[in-house]
Image (cartoon, rainbow, N blue to C red):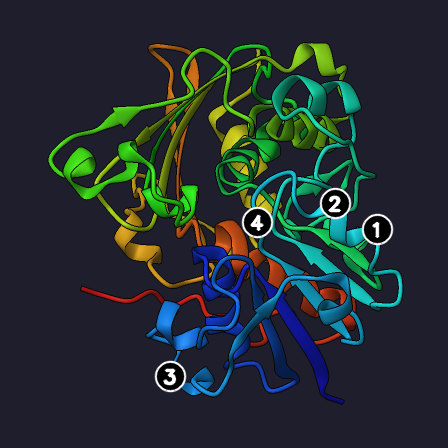
Amino acid sequence: MTFSVAVSGASGYAGGEILRLLAAHPDIEIRTVTAHSNAGQPLVQHQPHLRSLSGLTLQDTTPEVLSGHDIVFLALPHGQSGQYTDALGDVPLVIDAGADHRLTSQDAWDAFYGGDFHEPWAYGVPELPVAGAKQRESLRGATRIAAPGCNASTVSLSLAPGVAAGVIDPGDIVSVLAVGPSGAGKSLRPHLLGSELLGTANPYAVGGTHRHIPEIRQALVAASGTDPARIRISFTPVLVPMARGILATSTAPIVADASDEDIRAAWQDAYGDETFVQLLPEGAFPRTADVLGANTALIGLAIDRAANRVTVVTAVDNLVKGTAGAAIQSMNIALGLPEDRALTVNGVAP
């Protein structure tokens, strides 16, 4: 069976990456692409690397244009998806790459985003530990899926095994991330200009203000069933001059009596049979270059007994495993297709 697809926000980075991956999917027909200010223009004018889709023209993003497809991907800025999802009741599967349907708490939404709160959908991180199971179980047969925030899923995948196994204390988590600016989208903003990024590293959303913090806390609560008040995280992203990629370094205290074997086993047990989340051998740590273009999260784990902390270093491509790849992997699960269809563990090098 072939599924018809519409992709909104198709002229942006996330929409373009969704299209790049879907173009190689044997069960998908990309029928419609939409945009706002770029409507009426050829898709390849904005995504010149998508040569196989050169016959497509960007249409207006309206419920009428998006309806009538088997699957709709919404790759829109935060706060814009909800106005469309309410009107797409006839679409069998809708996947939102924005934040509108990620959070279960309206208080968290109000504190970090504001605007209208929309119902939470199945969270699109299949490998995430959830109360003794995996998030993929909630994705089987799902009709509405919220793709993750790239920083949030990277940190959540980094720490959820240790929190779920009770070998690290979630009350003192520190995460510092080196991130590429493509995660901020294509909108022209002075701090994202090449002249502002090249040759420097720029922290942003410092001091507990980043919007992905409640998403991380939500994932860690789901993994462990612990009291949300026990999850405390200091989260600092830093823009660095690479187009793609996240390198997240997260640390947390080791709980009393947790042995080195217990600690490493927590991550090995969580991800040992996963294709797209891989724990590296002891002493090995990933680079962002290792996951460029791949739907892979590579994890390095160190046990620092001098500081009594675990250090987890995780690398992802923010546009693939962080966004589009996670969305398509979740789509495959929802449709009963092979989970890895149109996705790869192989990066691009050099």
**Amino acid type assigned to the residue bearing label 4 in the image:** Tyr
The disc placed on residue 271 is: 4
The Cα–Cα distance between marks 2 and 1, rounded to whole angstroms, is 6 Å
Q: Is residue 341 above or below residue 279?
A: below
Between disc 3 and disc 4, whose residue precedes?
A: 3
- Secondary structure at numbered mark 3: helix
Neighbour tally class for label 4: few under 14, some 14-19, many 20 plus, Cα within 10 Å:
many
**Amino acid type assigned to the residue bearing label 1 in the image:** Asp
- Secondary structure at numbered mark 4: helix
Of circles 2 and 4, which is in front? Answer: 2
Q: Position of residue 11 (x, y in %)?
A: 46, 63
The Cα–Cα distance between marks 3 and 2, rounded to whole angstroms, is 31 Å
* Rendering quarter of residue 79: top right
The disc placed on residue 75 is: none
Figure quadrant of the C terminus: bottom left
The disc placed on residue 51 is: 3
Quickly name the residue at label 1: 86
Neighbour tally class for label 1: few under 14, some 14-19, many 20 plus, Cα within 10 Å:
few
Q: Nearer the viewer, residue 57 or 306?
A: 57
Q: Say if residue 338 shows up in the picture.
A: no
Between disc 2 and disc 4, whose residue precedes?
A: 2
- Secondary structure at numbered mark 1: loop
Q: Residue at x 22, y 65 (%)?
A: 349
Of circles 3 and 1, which is in front? Answer: 1
Question: Do callouts 2 and 1 mark residues in contact (Cβ within 8 Å)?
Answer: yes
Q: Nearer the viewer, residue 104 or 233?
A: 104
Quickly name the residue at label 2: 82
Q: Position of residue 209 (x, y in %)?
A: 51, 17
Question: Do callouts 3 and 4 mark residues in contact (Cβ within 8 Å)?
Answer: no
Q: Is residue 309 above or below residue 116?
A: above
Of circles 3 and 4, which is in front? Answer: 3
The Cα–Cα distance between marks 4 and 1, rounded to whole angstroms, is 36 Å
